[in-house]
Image (spheres, rainbow, N blue to C red):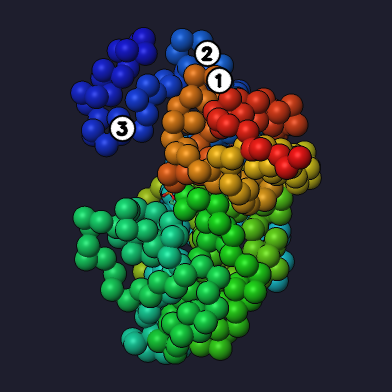
Amino acid sequence: MTKDEILKKQKQYLFPSVSTYYSDPLVTDHASMQHLWDVDGNKYLDFFGGIVTISVGHANPRVTSKIKAQVDKLQHASMVFPNEAVVALAEKIAQITPGEISQSFFSNSGTEAIEGSIKLARLAGHRVGGAAKSRLIALEGSYHGRTFGALSLTGQDKHRKGFEPLLEDVTFVPRNDVEALRAAVNDNTCAIVLEPIFGEGGIFECSVEFLQECRALADRHKAALVFDEIQCGLGRTGTIFAFRAFGVTPDIVAIAKPIAAGLPLGAFLAKEEFASAISPGQHGTTFGGGPLACRVALEYLAIVEEENLLANVNKVGGYLTQQLQQLVEDYAAAKEVRGRGLIQGIELEIPSRPIVEQGIAQGVLFNSTHDTVVRFLPPFLLQEQHVDKGIRVLRKFLGRKRRRAA
Ligand code: PMP
């Protein structure tokens, strides 16, 4: 099909909400590592990475060969009959988080991993504090997904509006406001849920001091500390889990996005004392933990480890920070650089959406989830030369140069 035919059918047969992202959307055809091609044969450098799923590259040959082998062997049999891939993956996760996280529950998406985390935290809370121990603490400006539970924790009106009433037992606290946090947490709190680095919310980091206070309050009040690492986890910070970069260990971690290289897979991971709060039959899934996605997830972790990709995330991420900082020095429209590793954003004085659209025309895929932030969440294989290309293109759209003091 041609681009026009695909767009026409999209408009006709998919919900209208799907067609509203860009005025002239790129229609994808194929992709390889950090590049993507549209149906007209145009090539794009990908700083967007399939909404943060393509961390080891598009169609990475190691991933592709595992998919092919597993497809021929076993595609699905459900968790009623366990498979080798799911137990090997859970074992691997426990091995890379020694003394921290020991058990996993696999889902199909990030939002389901958050739902599972809240359900687990409620059960663990009720176990130690009875029915009243059910309150949740979340952060203003956060994003946790689109189901009712996850939306109830999402601290942005633009996502919540129209769907109320949501879960009532949620108190929102401003990010990094230790006093507000202390005032909000009490013995009825069953969980503090947060993203250590806000992803969709525009790349804002929690401070170490704030996270340490979350840990201390969760311990004092026997509540679960839940980190949503769906976007910032699995290597993007230059450590395999974001919590390592901040030196604060949560009780429950939600992951998803890149873990199965674009196939649907999420998980909530927990310390044994929390995982044991859930009894057989209290939570379940048809597709979660399927052998195909889990086999790919094992390969994802192997690629990150064996190909030393975290070192590359740190090296090229550092270079990206420098180059973005240079834009702030050079252009009046560039305000602030935030993030680390390969989860970074630049705050602008001008709208970011037109820049993303103009970037597409120049062969570079940037991303923007907020009015004035251009985000960079590329595959971990990124090289300095790719950063240079992205920055060259960005410079074209930033307008007037700052006047230098003589
Ligand atoms: N939490 C965070 C931090 C996310 O970035 C996302 C997805 N953007 C989700 C939860 C929801 O994940 P999914 O879209 O896979 O349901």
Residue that badge 2 annotates: 42
Alpha-carbon distance for marks 2 and 3? 22 Å
First reached walking from the N terminus: tag 3 or tag 1: 3
- SS of the residue under disc 1: loop
* Quarter of the picture holding the N terminus: top left
Q: Which mark is residue 363?
A: 1
From this view, report whether residue 275 is shown above or below residue 26.
below
Do tag 1 and tag 2 residues touch (Cβ < 8 Å)?
Answer: yes
- SS of the residue under disc 2: loop
* Callout 2 amino acid: Asn
Do tag 3 and tag 1 residues touch (Cβ < 8 Å)?
Answer: no
From this view, report whether residue 324 is shown above or below residue 150.
above
* Callout 3 amino acid: Thr
Q: Residue at x 48, y 31 (%)?
A: 356
Alpha-carbon distance for marks 1 and 2? 8 Å
Q: Residue 296: percent from the left, percent from the top?
A: 59, 40
Q: Residue at x 52, y 56 (%)?
A: 198
Relative depth, front residue between 147 and 179 = 179
Quadrant housing residue 390: top right
Q: Residue 295: percent from the left, percent from the top?
A: 59, 42
Residue that badge 3 annotates: 20
Local crowd size for mark 1, using a 10 Å CA cut-off: few (<14), some (14–19), many (≥20):
some
Q: Residue 157: percent from the left, percent from the top?
A: 32, 58
Q: Residue at x 30, y 12 (%)?
A: 5
Q: Residue 316: percent from the left, percent from the top?
A: 74, 39
First reached walking from the N terminus: tag 2 or tag 3: 3
* Callout 1 amino acid: Gly
Relative depth, front residue between 24 and 89 = 24
Left or right of 312: which side holds 294?
Answer: left
Relative depth, front residue between 399 and 66 = 399
* Quarter of the picture holding the C terminus: top right
